[in-house]
Amino acid sequence: MIQGRIVTTEIAQSLQGVFFDYNTFFTFALDINNNYFLLLTEQDEIDLMNTEYSYLLDIPLSDFEPKPIKPPIL
C-alpha cells in the first residue's frame, strides 16, 4: 500500500509546483475520498528536513487509495 501525508486543500494549493530544492517541487494527488496527499520518496524526506517545509514531515503517514481509472470512451 502506498502511504503519504494528508494535507488541507489550502496547503496543497499554496505549495503545488513550489520547488523545495533545485530540481524537486511539490505535487499532490487526490485519493478516492478527495483528500489531498503529499507523496514523498525517502530522498524527498531527507531533502525536506532542513527547509522551511520540514513541518510537513510531522504529518502522520496514511494509506493512499487512488481514484479508479476510467477507461477512455472510444
Image: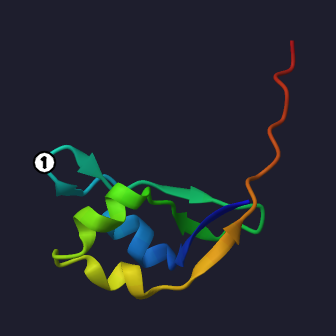
41 relative position to 17: left or right: right
Front-most of 68 and 23? 23
Task: Spot the residue most to the top.
Answer: 74
- Which secondary structure, mark 1? loop
Task: Spot the residue most to the left.
Answer: 22
Badge 1 density bin: few <14, some 14–19, many ≥20, Cα 10 Å: few
Residue 73: x and y in percent read: 86, 20
Q: Residue at x 26, y 48 (%)?
A: 24
Residue 70: x and y in percent read: 84, 35
Quarter assignment of residue 63? bottom right
Q: Classify the position of the C terminus by image quarter.
A: top right
54 relative position to 11: left or right: left
Which colour assignment does the render follow? Answer: rainbow
Quarter assignment of residue 46? bottom left
Residue type at mark 1 is: Tyr
Q: Residue at x 45, y 60 (%)?
A: 40
Residue on which disc 1 sits: 22
Front-most of 68 and 59? 59
Q: Residue at x 75, y 60 (%)?
A: 65
Q: Residue at x 65, y 76 (%)?
A: 62
Residue 11: x and y in percent read: 40, 75
So how many labels did they put on this image? 1
72 relative position to 13: left or right: right
Q: Classify the position of the N terminus by image quarter.
A: bottom right
